[in-house]
Amino acid sequence: MTARRWRVRWPAAALIAGLALAGGSAAGYALTRPPGHDYGTVPSSGTLASSHSGPADRPAATHRSGTAEPPAAAPAVTAVQVPVRLLIPAIGVNAPVLPTGVQAGGALAIPPDPADVGWWAGGGFPGEPTGAVVLVGHINSAVSGPGALLRLQDVRPGTTVTVTAAGHAYRYRVVALRAYAKTSLPVTAIFGQQVTARLVVVSCGGPFDPTTGHYLDNIVAYAVPAGQLPVLEGDDRAQRSREQQLDVTGRLCSMRTRQAVTHSANGVRNVGGIRVQICDVHPQRTGLGLPRRGNAQRVEMLIFEERERPDAGHPGNLELRRSQYAVFPTVMVVGIVCRRIRESPQCDVKSSIRPERNGVS
Amino acid sequence: MRISKLAAASMTAGFLFLTAGGAAATAVSASAATGTATVTVVHGIPNTPVDVYANGKKILSGFTFKTVAGPLQLPAGSYVIDVRKAGSAATSTPVLSATEPVTAGENATIVAALTASGTPVLTAFANDTSAAGTGKGRLVVRHVAAAPAVDVYAGSSKVISGLTSGQQQALDVLAGTVPAKVTLAGQTAAVLGPVNVPVTAGMATVVYAIGSAAGHTLTAVTQQYPLGGAPSSAQAGSGGLGADPNTPVWPFAVIGGAGLVLITAGAAGAARRRAA
């Protein structure tokens, strides 16, 4: 009798319990999933207003009722800039950028080496007045360990992101960060090109699902242009050579105009501009750690090692280093030579300097 | 033999150049959004530095053999392309001239090249941007040299047969490095290569055979451009290393899985009961 009653009821009980567990687990994940680090407003992704007509805008081609009329006698031919490197010093990113495309099914291909960052070559170019420059990088790889964008979720509002291309370094300022479930990715906001200039950096994050081997979320950082500056002296070669990331704090102790183009004894080309001396520099290896918080005169820079005499064994063997760029509170510097003489390191900044400006200059 | 040697040497030089400037040779297609076309220009005429004009405006100066310029963004429209000897007056008679209509979003490459018989010619190729399969890239071979028909080998297998000057052929292959060589059609001795051609997932790598066989200037240059339309996803991690430690997903998966088992068992039990 008891057995019979049990047999009558267990399927219903199991169904109820099953539904509760299955539904509960989904709800549990949804509820306990952290709110994430989302902040800021994603720049509008609507179509560009036709009234948008900044001076940098490309003149529209003249079309008249479908006939292919030649554009104005002088066409606005733009040689676009292809990104070669991504720098986010705040989270220890200094990665080569390789062009990539979209595979059948719509997945953006990502460079096989997790240390590389992919640039969607069908998207926008840095320095253009419109379009989204889309970069995508691994958070990590099961095979190779940490990826280039392991810590993308740690960028804060205002974090500086620099994309270098041939001849220029394009600076961006992070304005928003989002964690999106991959199942509901706002593809227009991320990949849409009908937008004023922006940079979109995509990685993965959130919970890791070991059954699929993938993360459930995409982490997306949105940034807007914050000026550009020329990159001098074949920085590309320097970037590809041994490189080291340092965080440097120091005191700006002199600044004067320097116009001459010379070759110093150690072979460094000094380019005209303003010479800046930074005193009391304290380089600190950061690796993947956060850069040191400094005072107002903190110099934020990446230093590329170009030692004439590798591993010179004397104390303070910061023999000769050159940075690609540095950011002062009010000026931007290109090309820095640091010489650490005994215990008092000094950096001579021997390149062009221009005031920081907002927007693409 | 002599041809082969020279070709190999200049090919190496060509590829070294491309390694340094490879990124700059990438063409692009999101130009539809801005009403522009993406145009890449390839110089394949030996010993002839030129200036290139579009509708009377100089767009490339001192453009030399084996150079790939671009990608350039051109507003959609029709362009008179004039090629003049480098440094000559903008009003001088062009060496080559052609009218090329370009449409918004189009991706094209214009090649200043030689015909099979060695006559300079401007050839425009539309770049096929349709997506390749997952993990695949597209290898495109364009024969724009003063040379007879050629075969193309990937490793030891012949992948393209009898390609004549002015023609192209494409194949989608898994990403990686393709050891490629070019032979005269029906022969086995390489006139170009072997060289390693990188094929990237989601990208097309175009290899141009340029120069002149008779002039011992046969060589190759490459261009890359992206495939596919707008992306809809990005899988950028596989190791779990960056997982948010506060939200492990597996307990929920386990509980949810247990729930599903119970649902299945319950439904089966109910069905059995009904059957009984």
Image (cartoon, coloured by chain):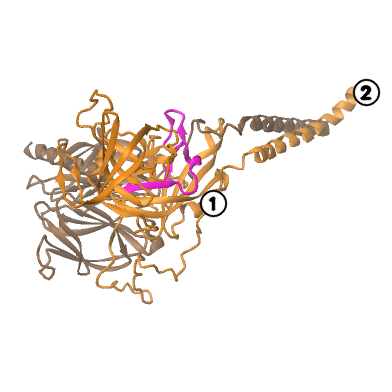
Chain colours: A orange, B brown
Q: Nearer the viewer, residue A148 or B29?
A: A148
Image coords of residue A171 (percent x, y): 37, 50
Residue A1: image location, x then y, percent? 93, 23
Left-right relation of B42 to A186? left
Name the residue located 70 percent from the left edge and 33 percent from the top edge.
B260
- Magenta segment: does it hold A286? no
| Badge 2 amino acid | Met
Q: Kindly state the secondary structure of the residue where label 1 is placed.
A: loop
- Name the residue beneath numbered marker 2: A1
Q: Is residue A154 magenta?
A: yes
Asked if residue A56 can be seen in this view, the reply is yes
> Mark 2 and mark 1: span between their CA atoms?
65 Å
Instruction: Please tell me which residue is depicted at 29% across the width and 34% down the height of the picture.
Output: A345
Specify the quadrant of the image occupied by residue A335. Answer: top left
The quadrant in which residue B162 appears is top left
**Which quadrant of the rendered structure holds the C terminus of chain B?**
top right
Residue A308: give x, y in percent of width and height: 19, 32
Residue type at numbered disc 1: Gly
| Image quadrant in which the N terminus of chain B is located | top left
Residue located beneath label 1 in the image:
A40
Q: Nearer the viewer, residue B203 or B181?
A: B203
Of pointers 2 and 1, the one earlier in the residue sequence: 2
Tell me where the magenta segment starts and ends, as one range: A135-164
Q: Nearer the viewer, mark 2 or mark 1?
A: 1
The chain under label 2 reads A
Label 2 CA crowd tier, 10 Å (few <14, some 14–19, many 20+): few
Count residues near mark 1 (Cα–Cα under 10 Å), then give few for <14, some for 14-19, many for 20+. some
One can see residue A101 in this view: no
Residue A217 image-quadrant placement? top right
In terms of depth relative to the viewer, which is nearer, A328 or B271?
A328
